[in-house]
Image: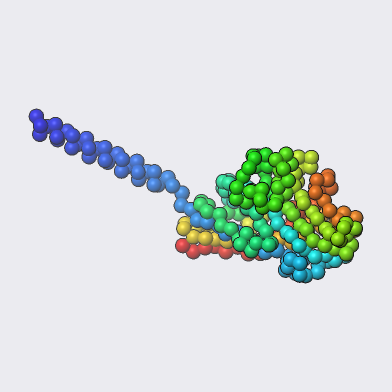
Amino acid sequence: MKTCFFSRFSRGLVLSISILCLISCNHTDDVTPTGQVQFQFTHVVGSLPLALNATQYTNAAGESFYVKTFKYYVSNIKFIRADGSEYAQPESYYLVNEGDSASKTFTIPNVPIGTYTGVNFMIGVDSTRNVSGAQTGALDALNDMFWSWKTGYIFVKMEGTSPSSTASGNRIEYHIGGFQNPNNIRTAAFSLVSNKLYIKSDSTSSIHFQTDVGQLFQTPNLIKFAETPALMTEPKTADIADNYSDMFSIVSIQTGTP
């Protein structure tokens, strides 16, 4: 009897282990390999590199100016495949700050392998996070990009001086934000059809972006410092929001090797 019992027990144990192994193997097969993508941002004003408090620039209206502060939010990053399907990075909120060189490069982990023909990201912070209370990391209020729990985040901040400015100290200040009346959230979208992004398993690919500060003031809306030296909550902030939709371009794309 004991022999029979242990025989049945052994067969049952072997069967259970086999089932567990099968489940484990199937589960492993279902996991999509991933790689990562590094975003790099270089800031310029037209054809000149951005240098805070050091270089005099000229806007499209012919007015000279210096830049003291330049920073903005990149969020809700999406990678688009040729069939139109998307991979959206969860919890993607980054503050890019010319005054902090480390912030101009960041890495997006766990991107499914494959070929991508487009990428886009939000310039600013979505409405949900604008009213979500105290937050950490890039969205920490201590980053000086937050007005209040009612009005939310500053999406793009540019500060400097210009002899053309009629404000005290010849200052120019543009703090653009708001997700309603006006809604200044914009999306930067890039087609990669002619220069595809390839994500390989356990490797790092990269996209190098260029951000043109001068674009804030020129297309499609010409902003003159003599007429509008500062903007924060006025309806006209939407003019600059329309301009910063086009301040990004892609310099290069590199595919990583495992």
Q: Going 73% across and 53% down the picture, which residue do you hit?
A: 156
Residue 45, quarter of picture: bottom right
Residue 126 spot, x, y in % from top left: 67, 43
Q: Going 86% across and 61% down the picture, which residue do you hit?
A: 170
Report the front residue among 81 and 175: 175
Q: Is residue 59 visible?
A: no
Residue 177 spot, x, y in % from top left: 75, 47
Q: Going 77% across and 70% down the picture, which residue do you hit?
A: 55
Q: Going 10% across and 32% down the picture, which residue do you hit?
A: 2
Q: Is residue 196 above or below residue 84?
A: below
Residue 32 spot, x, y in % from top left: 46, 49
Report the front residue among 248 and 79: 248
Residue 180 left/right relative to 139: right
Residue 229, quarter of picture: bottom right
Report the front residue among 252 and 77: 77
Quarter of the image that includes the N terminus:
top left
Q: Is residue 151 above or below residue 224?
A: above
Picture mark count = 0
Visual colour scheme: rainbow
Q: Is residue 90 visible?
A: yes
Residue 49 spot, x, y in % from top left: 72, 68
